[in-house]
Image (cartoon, helix red, strand yellow):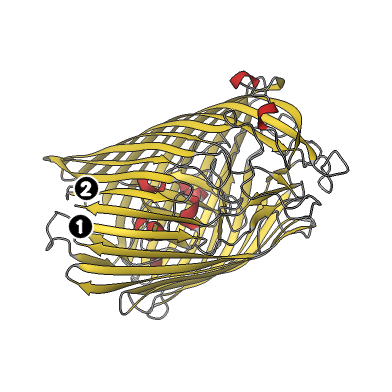
C-alpha cells in the first residue's frame, strides 16, 4: 500500500517538460517481494513511503519516515542520535537496504541518511522466506536513489532549530551513451535538544548505471558517511523526571556527561553492485552484493538509576547520584549477496506463475573494546570540570573485549500464482544455515526452514480479502549476559485482512494478526548493567491495524492510520516495555494553484501514542502536531516544516529499571531548493 499518490517530474529544465504525472496507488510497486508486485496482489500489508511524502513530513532520520505508518511506533525511545529505533507490531524490526540487511549489532555503526533513499518500504509481519534473517514484527527496506538517463537535480540550503545548518544536493543524468550517474550529498552542522550533543554529518553517495545492452542493467553505488555526534539519550532517573524530586524536575535538555569526552562518532563506507539481466520477456536474472566497513567511538555517561530505581540518590537531599562512564570502540564488517532467477510462465490461459528462486549469503564480524568507570555527581548542579576524561580514551575499569562473527547461507523459492487476474496465491520456502562464533567460545550452528503461504482475491471490484501464514528466523549478533552467543529467534504469524480499492485514488487496508516468537533478548535484572540481556522464552503479539490513503479532488491527499497491539512475554500478563496498545495518526496536504507558475502546498498531521507500561511504571500518552508550508515558483521551492509544533513536553518511554527517555522537542526548519 502506498501512503500517498506520487508526483513524478520529467525534469529536463524546460517548463513544458516539467509536467506532473500522477502515479496512483495501484501503479506503485515495491521491491519487498523481490519481484515488482502491486500491493493489491500481495497477501501481506506492505507500506511504501515515498521521498516526496517523508520530506513533506519533515523527516530528518529513517525512524522519522515511519511516523505515519500503521502498526509502527517510530522513535520508540525518543529522538536517538545513535540508532533509528522503532517498533513494528511491538517488535524491533531489522533494517535492509536494497533487499540486503545492513545492520548487525548495536552501537557498531551510524544511522542511515533518509535523503539517500527514493522510498522506504515497511513489511509488517515475518518475511524470512525471501529475506532470511528477519524480525517477526516486520522489516524496513530502504531503496537507494539510483541514476536516471533523464537529467534532473536539486540543491537545497536549510536552517532550523538547534542551530541546524545544512546543504543538500541530488543530481542525476546521462554521462554518455549507455552510462548514467547520480550524486547525492548532505553536509550538516547542528546541535540537538540535548545540551553539548552535536549532530554533524558529512554524507555523499555516487552511483553509476551502465547498460551495455538493452537487456542488462549494472548499477554501482559507493557511499561514504561520517557523523560527529553524541547521545541524545541521557537515561535520566525516574525520580526527577516522571516521579517528583524535592529539588524539582530535571530539564529535558540536561546533559550528564563530560563535554568533549562524550561522543558518538562514526565512519561508514559502503560499496554495492546491482545487476539485472533480462534473458527474455519471461526470464530475469538478478545479482547483488554489498560490502560495509564501519567503525564507531561511543563514549557516554549515564546515572546509576538501576541499583535502586525507586530512590537512586545517595543523600537525604536527593541530589547526589552515582554516574557510570562507559566507553567502547566498535568495528563492523559486513559482506552480503543475493542472487536469484525469476521465471514467468503460464500453465493455462487463466493461470500465470511468477517463480523466483535464489541463494543469498552474508558474513559479518563485530569487534568491540570497552571499559567502565564510576563517579558521583550532584545531578542538579553538575561540576563538568571535575569529571574525568580518562586522557581522552577508554575508562580503566572492567576492560572488555567482544569479537563475534556470523555467517548465513540461505536457499529460497517462491511461486506467485495468478488466477483469472483476480486471485493471487503465494507459496514459498527457505532453508537457512547459520554459524556464530565468539572469540574464545564454541561455535553455535543453527539450521532452519521457513515457510510462507498466502492468498488474496478480488471477490468484488475493489474488494480483496487476504489470508497468510508466515515464519521468521533471526540470528542475533552478540552475547547474552552469561557470555554465551545469542540463540536465533524464531517466529510465526497468522494474518487475515482486506484491501479496499474502490478507485485508483483510494487504498484502505484492514488486518488482524497473531504472532508467536521464541528466544527474545530482554533486560537481565540479575546484573546492574542496564545493557545486559538474557533470552526469554516466548512472546505473543496480536492486534489489528487500519491504514488508509485517499487522493481527493482539489489536490488534497490524506493518510489515516489506527493500530491496536497487545504484546506480552508469555506467562507474564504484562505488556512489553514501551509498547503502547494504541497508536493513531492523520496526515494531509493540499496544493493550491496561485497562477503564474506559483503554487502553495500546505499540510499538517496529528500523531497519537497511547500510554505504555514497564512493570508498574506508566508512561503517559501524548499527541503531537506537525505542519508544512511549501511555496513553489518556477524552479524554486521555499518550505517550512515543523515537528511537534505545539512543543508538547512528553516522555517517549520510562522503564521500571529506573530511567526515562525524553520525547522530541519542537523542531522547525526552513529550506530553499532550486530544481533543474
Q: On the picture, is 137 further left or further right than 320?
A: left
Pointer 2 residue: 148
Task: Say which residue appears at 83% left-offset and 49% top-offset.
Answer: 310
Q: On the picture, is 472 further left or further right than 204?
A: right
Any mark on residue 635, and which?
Answer: 1
Residue 552 higher or lower than 72, as above or below: below
Residue 370 higher or lower than 664, as above or below: above
Residue 430 placed where, x, y %? 50, 46
Q: Residue furthest right?
A: 316
| Mark 2 or mark 1: whose residue is earlier in sequence | 2
User: Do the residues bearing badges 2 and 1 touch, measured as CB atoms within 8 Å?
Assistant: no
- The secondary structure type at the circle numbered 2 is loop
Q: On the picture, is 144 further left or further right than 559?
A: left
Residue 253 higher or lower than 467, as above or below: above
**Residue 1, visible in the rendered structure:** no
Residue 500 placed where, x, y %? 43, 76
Mark 2 or 1, which is nearer the eye? Answer: 1
Instruction: Determine crowd level at label 1: few under 14, some 14-19, many 20+ residues with C-alpha closer than 10 A.
Output: some
Q: CA distance from mark 2 to mark 1?
A: 19 Å
Residue 24 placed where, x, y %? 31, 69
Residue 196 higher or lower than 390, as above or below: below
Task: Point out the image quarter for the N terminus.
Answer: bottom left
Instruction: Determine crowd level at label 2: few under 14, some 14-19, many 20+ residues with C-alpha closer than 10 A.
Output: some
Instruction: Depth check: give the residue in front, 521 or 549.
Output: 549
Residue 257 placed where, x, y %? 65, 34
Any mark on residue 110, and which?
Answer: none
**Residue 327, visible in the rendered structure:** yes
Q: How many marks?
A: 2
Res 337 → quadrant: top left
- The secondary structure type at the circle numbered 1 is loop
Amino acid at each position: 500500500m502506498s501512503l500517498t499518490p506520487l508526483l513524478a517530474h520529467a525534469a529536463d529544465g524546460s517548463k513544458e517538460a516539467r509536467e506532473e504525472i500522477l502515479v496512483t496507488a495501484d501503479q506503485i510497486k515495491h521491491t519487498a517481494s523481490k519481484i515488482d508486485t502491486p500491493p493489491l496482489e500481495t497477501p501481506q500489508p506492505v507500506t511504501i513511503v515515498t521521498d516526496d511524502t517523508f520530506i513533506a513530513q519533515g523527516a530528518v532520520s529513517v525512524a522519522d519516515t515511519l511516523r505515519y505508518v500503521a502498526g509502527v511506533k517510530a522513535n520508540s525511545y525518543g529522538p536517538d542520535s545513535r540508532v533509528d529505533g522503532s517498533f513494528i507490531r511491538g517488535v524491533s524490526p531489522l533494517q535492509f537496504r536494497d533487499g540486503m540487511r545492513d545492520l548487525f549489532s548495536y552501537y557498531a555503526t551510524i544511522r542511515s541518511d533518509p535523503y539517500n533513499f527514493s522510498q522506504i518500504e515497511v513489511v509488517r509481519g515475518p518475511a524470512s522466506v525471501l529475506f532470511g534473517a528477519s524480525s517477526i514484527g516486520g522489516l524496513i527496506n530502504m531503496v537507494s536513489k539510483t541514476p536516471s538517463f533523464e537529467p534532473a537535480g536539486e540543491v537545497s540550503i536549510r536552517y532550523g532549530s538547534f542551530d541546524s545548518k545544512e546543504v543538500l544536493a541530488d543530481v542525476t543524468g546521462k554521462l554518455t551513451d549507455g552510462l548514467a550517474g547520480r550524486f547525492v550529498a548532505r553536509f550538516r552542522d547542528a546541535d540537538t535538544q540535548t545540551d553539548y550533543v552535536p549532530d554533524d554529518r558529512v554524507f555523499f553517495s555516487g552511483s553509476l548505471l551502465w547498460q551495455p545492452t538493452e537487456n542488462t542493467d549494472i548499477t554501482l553505488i559507493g557511499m561514504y558517511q561520517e557523523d560527529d555526534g553524541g547521545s541524545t539519550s541521557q537515561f535520566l532517573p525516574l525520580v526527577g523526571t516522571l516521579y517528583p524530586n524535592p529539588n524539582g524536575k530535571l530539564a529535558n535538555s540536561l546533559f550528564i556527561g563530560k563535554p568533549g569526552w562524550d561522543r558518538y562518532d562514526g565512519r561508514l563506507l559502503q560499496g554495492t553492485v546491482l545487476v539485472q539481466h533480462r534473458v527474455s520477456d519471461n526470464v530475469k536474472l538478478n545479482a547483488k552484493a554489498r560490502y560495509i566497513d564501519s567503525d564507531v567511538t561511543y563514549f557516554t555517561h549515564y546515572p546509576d538509576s538501576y541499583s535502586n530505581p525507586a530512590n537512586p540518590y545517595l543523600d537525604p537531599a536527593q541530589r547526589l547520584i552515582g554516574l557510570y562512564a562507559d566507553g567502547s570502540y566498535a568495528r563492523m564488517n559486513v559482506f552480503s549477496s543475493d542472487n536469484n532467477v525469476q521465471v514467468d510462465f503460464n500453465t493455462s490461459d487463466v493461470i500465470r506463475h511468477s517463480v523466483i528462486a535464489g541463494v543469498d549469503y552474508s558474513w559479518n564480524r563485530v569487534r568491540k573494546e570497552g571499559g567502565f568507570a564510576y563517579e558521583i555527581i550532584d545531578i542538579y548542579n553538575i561540576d563538568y570540570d571535575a569529571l574525568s576524561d580518562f586522557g581522552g580514551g577508554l575508562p580503566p575499569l572492567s576492560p572488555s573485549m567482544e569479537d563475534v562473527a556470523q555467517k548465513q547461507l540461505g536457499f529460497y523459492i517462491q511461486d506467485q500464482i495468478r488466477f483469472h487476474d483476480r486471485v493471487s496465491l503465494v507459496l514459498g520456502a527457505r532453508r537457512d544455515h547459520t554459524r556464530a562464533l565468539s572469540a574464545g567460545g564454541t561455535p553455535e550452528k543453527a539450521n532452519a526452514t521457513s515457510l510462507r503461504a498466502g492468498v488474496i482475491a478480488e471477490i468484488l471490484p475493489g474488494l480483496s480479502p487476504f489470508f497468510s501464514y508466515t515464519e521468521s528466523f533471526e540470528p542475533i549478533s552478540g552475547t547474552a549476559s552469561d557470555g554465551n552467543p545469542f540463540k536465533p529467534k524464531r517466529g510465526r504469524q497468522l494474518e487475515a485482512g482486506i484491501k479496499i480499492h474502490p478507485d485508483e485514488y483510494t487504498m484502505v487496508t484492514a488486518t488482524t494478526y497473531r504472532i508467536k516468537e521464541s528466544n527474545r533478548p530482554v533486560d537481565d535484572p540479575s546484573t546492574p548493567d542496564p545493557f545486559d540481556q538474557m533470552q526469554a522464552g516466548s512472546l505473543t503479539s496480536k492486534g489489528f491495524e487500519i491504514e488508509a490513503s485517499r487522493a481527493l479532488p482539489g489536490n488534497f491527499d490524506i493518510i489515516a492510520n489506527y493500530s491496536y497491539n497487545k504484546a506480552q512475554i508469555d506467562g507474564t500478563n504484562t505488556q512489553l516495555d514501551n509498547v503502547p496498545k494504541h497508536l493513531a495518526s492523520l496526515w494531509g496536504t493540499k496544493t493550491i494553484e496561485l497562477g503564474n507558475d506559483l503554487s502553495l502546498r500546505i499540510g499538517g498531521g496529528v500523531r497519537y501514542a497511547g500510554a505504555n507500561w514497564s512493570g508498574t511504571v506508566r508512561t503517559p500518552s501524548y499527541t503531537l502536531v506537525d505542519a508544512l508550508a511549501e511555496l513553489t515558483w518556477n524552479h524554486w521551492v521555499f518550505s517550512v516544516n515543523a515537528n511537534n509544533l505545539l512543543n508538547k513536553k512528553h516522555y517517549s518511554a520510562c522503564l521500571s529499571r529506573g530511567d526515562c527517555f525524553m520525547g522530541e522537542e519542537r523542531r522547525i526548519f526552513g529550506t530553499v531548493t532550486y530544481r533543474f
